[in-house]
Every structure is written in C-alpha cells, then in structure tokens.
Image (spheres, helix red, strand yellow):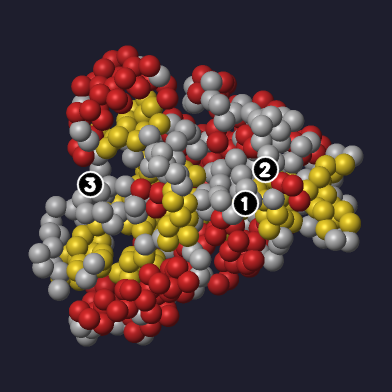
Amino acid sequence: MFKPYDCYSFYDEMLEGNKPKKHYIPFYEQLLKFTDEELLTKHTSAQSSFLRQGITFTVYGADGDTERTMPFDFVPIIIPEQVWGNIEKGMKQRVEALNLFLHDVYHDQLILEAGVVPKSLIENNPYHYKEVIGANLPLHNHIFLAGIDLIRDESGEYRVLEDNLRNPSGISYVYQNRYVMRKMYPEFFRDYSIETLEVQLLQIQEALLSHRPVNLETGKDPRAVLLTAGIYNSAYYDHVFLAKEMNIPLVEGRDMVVKNKKVYLKTIRGLKQVDIIYRRIDDDFLDPLTFREDSLIGVPGIMETYKEGNVAILNAVGNGVADDKAIYMYVPEMIRFYLNEEPIIKNVDTYLLTNEERKNWVLDNLDKLVIKNVGASGGYDMLIGPHSTEEEREIFRQKIEEAPHQYIAQPTIKLSRAPAFQEGRFYPCHVDLRVFVMRGKETHVLPGGLSRVALKEGSLVVNSSQGGGGKDTWVIKEAKVHA
C-alpha cells in the first residue's frame, strides 16, 4: 500500500521500516480492508463536505484574492497519551513565561534591566506599543488564545517552531477535521479511545468571560462580542465558528460605538454596553484615532476605553512584541528568568543577523538555511535555501543587506513526515502541529491541535496559504488501544 515509500530519510509519524508503529497498528489494519476505489470515494466525499459547509480561507496574492477550501487528508496524526502529556506541560510552561514577559515589557521591564533580552529588540520593535504601557489588564493576562507551532526533527524530538500570540487562526479546522473524519471514516475509531474536543468549547467560553474589565460592576455578567474584519477576511470561517460556539455576537467595527469612554453595541433595542471584545483584527486597525487613520474596520476611541479599564480586548493589544521571530530565540531564557525552570520543549536553533560576522556567514550559506522575516507569518517572505533558486537567494541577499535586523536564519530541519492520500495514492508529506492554549483563570490545552501537512510533494511549507492542508490529530489513551 505504501510502496514506494521512503521511511528512512526522515522521522515518520506512522511508519518504521515500512511497518506501522504500535499505536498505528489498529488504524493500519483497518486501512488494509478498504479497496482503492473505496478510499478514493471517501476522499472525494470528505473534500466535498468542507465545500458544502463553506469551510474556506482566502489566499492574498498579486493575481487577486482566491477563496479555497482547506485540503483534508484522512491519515491522522496519532499521539500517545504519555507523549501528549509532555507537550501539554511544555505548552503551559511556555505560554506562562510569554505572558509574564508581555506584562513585564509593558510595566517594570525587569528582564530588560537584567540584560536577558536586549533593550533594542523592544525599543525598535514595531509591535511594542507605547500607547498601552502600564495598562491594567484583567487577570494580568495578555494571552487569551495562543497558537504554538511544533515540529519534530529527524530524531523525533518535538521543537517549537513559532509562537502565535496575536490572532492565531485554525481552531475551527480542528473541530471540522474531527467531524469529517468521524462522518466519512467511522471505521477507524472502533479500536481507539481518543481524547474528545467538546469540553474545550466550554472552557474557551469560560476563559473568555473570566476577563472581566477592571471597572466592571461586581456581580454584573459581562457582555462579550467577537470583532471581525468581515466576510473577506482570510479566517472568516474561524470567526463564525468561534462566535457561534461561544454564544457571542459576531460584529464588525461599524456595529459598535464609543460614548463616555465606554463601548456600546448597536442593536434594534438601542445601545448595549460591551465589556469583552475578542478581536480578530490587527492592532493597527483597532482604533483610527490611535493607530492607522485610514482604518475602516476599527472602532474610533476604543483604545482610550481600553486604557481606562472599561473594556477588555483579547488578545491584548501589543502582543506582537512577544511573537516576533527575533524575540523567539529568547523564550528559553524567559522561562529560566521568570519560572526558574528549564524549557520542557526546546526551540529550533535561530541566528540573529545584526552581528556582522554572523550575517556574512548566513549570506555565504543561504542555500543551506531557512530565512524568515521577523514580523511575517503564513509562510510569506521566507526563503527555504535547499529548495530555492539562485535568483531567489539573490533577492534575499539584498533584503538582508538592506535590513539585517528584519530577518533571522534557522538550519533546515528534516521535518517529520506522515503518509498522505491524495489523487488516489499514498506518498510521504512533511507535517507540523499547531497547539492551541487557552488562558483565563485556568490554563487549558486543546488535545491534539491542528496538524498541518505540506501536500505538495517535497515541500516544507505547511501553511494553508501556501498550499498546505490539514489532518485530524488524535491524542489516544494507550491502555485502550488494541495492538
């Protein structure tokens, strides 16, 4: 079934020596019972299900914006309970340290005074907003929802690739992948006991509502909304899904108004005060009176209300200073500084390019390295050296020479792979895992998260905006798996 399939050049999630690993055996045995025609029929039905439900995202490009469905692959990523337990602890540790860092850089800046993180990385960071310095946030919590991207290297060790602390997207796909998997491939679930996802929807709602603004009257239930940029936003389906599941209105900036330093929602029954805003628009567009004057999707005056403590905005304004790719390399030091602990899950080795000697070394080895813009996301403005052309390397050479502080370099890691079934055949594809961490009065980690797969053969880019797809992710209770 998997021939020809090279299991030896990379760490494979499912196979070892062309045989399934222990926790994949029930899945593999069931897979052998299907004919090629049955698999193709199920695959086609699964893709159609996403289209019928309107599960799409938008790719922005020079040739215009394109709306696409998220490609789905039915071979799940299966994670044993013990392995997941270590991931969960590592994610809670990391996000706790990142939250302490955010609170620190907007208040006492102890980590800067201690020289652990260079002051220049904060002072010159475009995502560090002086407008929110000293802001008193509910629960002192800057991170309501984090999306931490993990990869596995050639030895199978998990490493953190990226922190997403502003507006991480994709949580709706976790649920839809599971829904489609259970509907189209129910046979695979018979021999597994899998951690469910349903209770986390209640936990994310509780976490949201726990962010009571500091000036909210005691005993009063907070009113929350989800602020979207509208139907043309790339993650609009994500917004619709979360608003529905958290039972809060989905609104646009024009639906709200600020009066007397309070935010109100316009309704057919008059103005209703809003206490918590889960916003899915970037900082720069939140308030045209404070940030971009040309913003048509924000709420004029909302930042003054925020600083007064009359409304909570989640995730907090200014979080971008902590998920900048240059700051990323200092997260292990944050963990040691704030928690006095060693990182449970390590970073990928990362090089800043502001040092002349290091920059020259990187320029001499562009064909072997991955180059990333410190502020970009979604796979944009990135060079994967081994897969690049001389022309592409020359473009990045010029970018680095012009703005070395804007780029970081990382070694090209041999990302783990897993089988994918596309176009009627199995072939190996690189995968990563976005883990979602929810923070309120307590911290919860969504079991499994979003496994993203680079469906283009040989590609290392898993982002949906660059042609990647999704897989269901199972956290299994090992005692219930029948080998």
Q: Earlier in the sequence, mark 1 or mark 2?
A: 1
Q: Position of residue 26 (x, y in %)?
A: 27, 80
Q: Position of residue 440 (x, y in %)?
A: 65, 54
Q: Which of the pair 343/430 is nearer the observer? A: 430
The kind of secondary structure element at disc 2 is loop
Residue that mark 2 sits on: 297
Mark 3 against mark 2, which lies toward the viewer?
2
Residue that mark 3 sits on: 414
Amino acid type at mark 2: Ile
Q: Residue at point 30% right, 82% down?
A: 482
Left or right of residue 331: residue 387: left
Pointer 3 and pointer 2: residues touching (CB < 8 Å)?
Answer: no
Amino acid type at mark 1: Gly
User: Alpha carbon of mark 3 to alpha carbon of mark 2: how far?
Assistant: 41 Å
Q: Residue at point 55% right, 26% down?
A: 126
Image quarter where the N terminus lies is bottom left
4 w.r.t. 192: above or below: above
The kind of secondary structure element at disc 1 is loop
Q: Residues within 10 Å of mark 3 (few under 14, many from 20)?
A: some
Residue that mark 1 sits on: 230
Pointer 1 and pointer 2: residues touching (CB < 8 Å)?
Answer: yes
| Quarter where residue 236 is shown | bottom right
Mark 1 against mark 3, which lies toward the viewer?
1
Q: Which of the pair 215/430 is nearer the observer? A: 430
